[in-house]
Image: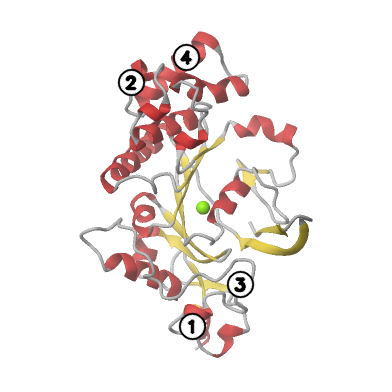
């Protein structure tokens, strides 16, 4: 709730602090048990920062992070340790995050041993079960991750993330590097695992179609702020914020190839997060910008059942 994260920017040899990036600015959302919240936005929108804050891999400058009803924003590393196993992350490129000398077995059992959950034969047994759970075989335990295709390697990444029996899985661009057909397989795997294990997901991607496929609720981020959020279907069928509208129009434009990367579909470049535009951050690119947009930050207003959006156009309509 109300998460704020500033990063000091350091430049040059002196590494003096020359400014602060408000990478995340007042971001608030909740993830219910068994639910998938999709976080979508262009690169530089602060999505990965939110992921790392949620997992407390970064400390928030201010704000609150609750996990299982417990405030974790201020916990020390030692206090966090027992909670760590309950939240795990799946990265975009699993192979590069694994030590190339480690076998699949050691990749998956490492978190079990690090957290003193199990070791030796018991951990190996668990690793084999996890491989079967993600659609690989226990016979793969002594191979190396780089011997697998991208989709298979991501299955290993998911098996590793599941090793400690987490309740929350943060998927940070987990399928973005995969071919479209492989993406669908991994997304279907994630959906099945969610059903079977009752997992909650924070699913982060720049691709609205991928997010739509897996999410119950969607949060749209732009330059560190959530500009719109609500139930996935309603939000994407009828986006209220001009930024969401341009994202949705971009994927609607290519229905036969829905997950193809499209560049420059939202007109204009994303401004630098270190120097975001005043008022509504989106105003330089917004086709509907009007008087207050340049100077006044729009507040989140109700935009339908369970929905909010932060745009002066909606504020006007509500007052009218
Ligand atoms: Fe566009 Fe203004 Fe709405 Fe921002 S507040 S999205 S600039 S109309
Ligand atoms: Mg990122």
The kind of secondary structure element at disc 2 is loop
Tags 2 and 4 touching, CB below 8 Å: no
Q: Marks 1/3: CA distance?
A: 20 Å
Q: Disc 4 beta carbon < 8 A from ligand 2?
A: no
User: In the current view of this chain or complex, which residue is farthest to the left?
Assistant: 256
Left or right of 15, for residue 159: left
Q: Nearer the viewer, residue 151 or 51?
A: 151
The residue wearing badge 4 is 124
Q: Position of residue 216 (x, y in %)?
A: 40, 52
Residue name at image x 46 percent, y 17 percent: 126
Residue name at image x 46 percent, y 72 percent: 303
Residue 175, above or below 217: above
Q: Marks 4/3: CA distance?
A: 49 Å
Q: Position of residue 289 (x, y in %)?
A: 49, 85
Q: Marks 2/4: CA distance?
A: 13 Å
Q: Marks 3/2: CA distance?
A: 48 Å
Left or right of 299, for residue 151: left
**Mark 4 or 3: the one toward you:** 3
Residue 169, above or below 20: above
Disc number for residue 137: 2
Q: Nearer the viewer, residue 181 or 86?
A: 181
Q: Earlier in the sequence, mark 2 or mark 4?
A: 4
Residue name at image x 59 percent, y 84 percent: 294
Q: Disc 1 beta carbon < 8 A from ligand 1?
A: yes
Q: Nearer the viewer, residue 17 or 82?
A: 17
The residue wearing badge 1 is 313
């Amino acid at each position: 709730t109300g998460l704020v994260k500033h990063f000091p920017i350091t430049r040059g040899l002196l590494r003096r602090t020359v400014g602060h990036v408000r990478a995340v600015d007042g971001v608030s959302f909740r993830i219910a048990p068994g639910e998938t919240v999709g976080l979508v936005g262009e690169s530089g929108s602060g999505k990965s920062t939110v992921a790392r804050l949620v997992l407390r891999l970064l400390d928030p400058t201010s704000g609150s992070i609750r996990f299982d009803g417990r405030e974790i924003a201020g916990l020390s590393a030692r206090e966090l340790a027992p909670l760590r196993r309950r939240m795990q992350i799946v990265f975009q490129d699993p192979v590069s995050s694994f030590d190339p000398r480690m076998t699949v077995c050691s990749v998956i059992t490492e978190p079990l041993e690090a957290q003193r959950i199990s070791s030796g034969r018991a951990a190996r047994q668990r690793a084999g079960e996890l491989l079967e759970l993600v659609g690989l075989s226990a016979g793969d335990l002594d191979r190396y991750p780089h011997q697998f295709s991208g989709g298979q390697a991501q299955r290993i990444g998911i098996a590793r993330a599941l090793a400690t029996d987490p309740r929350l899985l943060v998927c940070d661009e987990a399928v973005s590097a995969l071919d479209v057909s492989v993406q669908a397989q991994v997304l279907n795997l994630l959906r099945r695992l969610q059903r079977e294990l009752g997992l909650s997901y924070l699913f982060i991607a720049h691709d609205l179609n991928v997010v739509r496929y897996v999410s119950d609720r969607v949060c749209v981020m732009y330059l560190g702020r959530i500009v719109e959020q609500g139930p996935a279907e309603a939000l994407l069928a009828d986006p209220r914020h001009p930024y969401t509208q341009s994202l949705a129009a971009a994927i609607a434009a290519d229905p036969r190839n829905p997950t193809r990367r499209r560049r420059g579909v939202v007109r204009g470049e994303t401004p630098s997060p270190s120097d975001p535009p005043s008022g509504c951050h989106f105003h330089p690119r917004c086709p509907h910008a009007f008087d207050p947009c340049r100077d006044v930050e729009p507040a989140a207003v109700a935009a339908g059942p369970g929905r909010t959006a932060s745009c002066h156009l909606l504020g006007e309509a509500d007052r009218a």
